[in-house]
């Protein structure tokens, strides 16, 4: 499944400048050759999709806006 996600990112018209791959309670393999800045984050506990997203956003100096259920742009 990760391979399909990464292939989808690689096919976008604009190459990503920053990406985060979050292992939500699981170990992650190496991801050689990914474009742009890639942060690989392994969490000891599964925080769920919102929790993993928030950890990734915090790594980039952002976070969800109060009362918002969408990712900030």
Image (tube, rainbow, N blue to C red):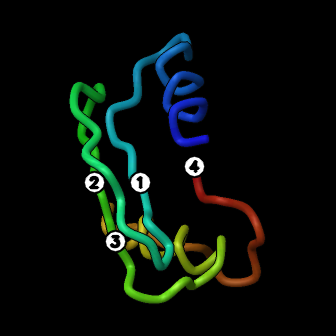
Which of discs 4 and 3 lies nearer the camera? The answer is: 3
Q: Which residue is mark 2?
A: 39
Q: Secondary structure at mark 2?
A: strand
Q: Are marks 4 and 3 in contact (CB under 8 Å)?
A: no
In the image, what residue occupies the spot 44% across and 66% down? 23
Instruction: Give the residue drawn at x 41%, y 20%.
Output: 15
Callout 1: helix, strand or loop? strand
**Number of the front mark, 4 or 1:** 1
Name which of mark 1 and mark 2 comes first in the sequence.
Answer: 1
Q: Which residue is mark 1?
A: 21
Q: Secondary structure at mark 3?
A: strand
Q: Residues within 10 Å of mark 4 (few under 14, many from 20)?
A: few
Mark 4 and mark 3: Cα distance apart in space:
24 Å
Tag on residue 73?
Answer: 4
Q: Position of residue 37 (x, y in %)?
A: 24, 40
Give whichever of discs 4 and 1 has the lower sequence position.
1
Kindly indicate whether the residue at mark 2 contacts the one at mark 1 (C-beta within 8 angstroms).
yes
Residue at which label 3 appears: 42
Q: What residue is drawn where x is 58% and y is 73%?
A: 64
Disc 1 to disc 2, C-alpha distance: 6 Å
Of mark 1 and mark 3, the one earlier in the sequence is 1
Give the answer, above or below, for where 67 lies relative to 22.
below
Kindly indicate whether the residue at mark 3 contacts the one at mark 2 (C-beta within 8 angstroms).
no
Answer above or below: position of 8 versus 11. Answer: below
> For residue 8, which numbered disc appears in the image?
none
């Amino acid at each position: 499944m990760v391979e399909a996600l990464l292939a989808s990112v690689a096919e976008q018209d604009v190459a990503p400048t920053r990406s985060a791959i979050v292992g939500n309670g699981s170990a992650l393999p190496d991801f050689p050759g990914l474009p742009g800045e890639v942060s690989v984050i392994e969490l000891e506990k599964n925080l769920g999709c919102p929790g993993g997203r928030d950890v990734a956003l915090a790594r980039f100096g952002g976070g969800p806006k109060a009362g918002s259920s969408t990712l900030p742009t």
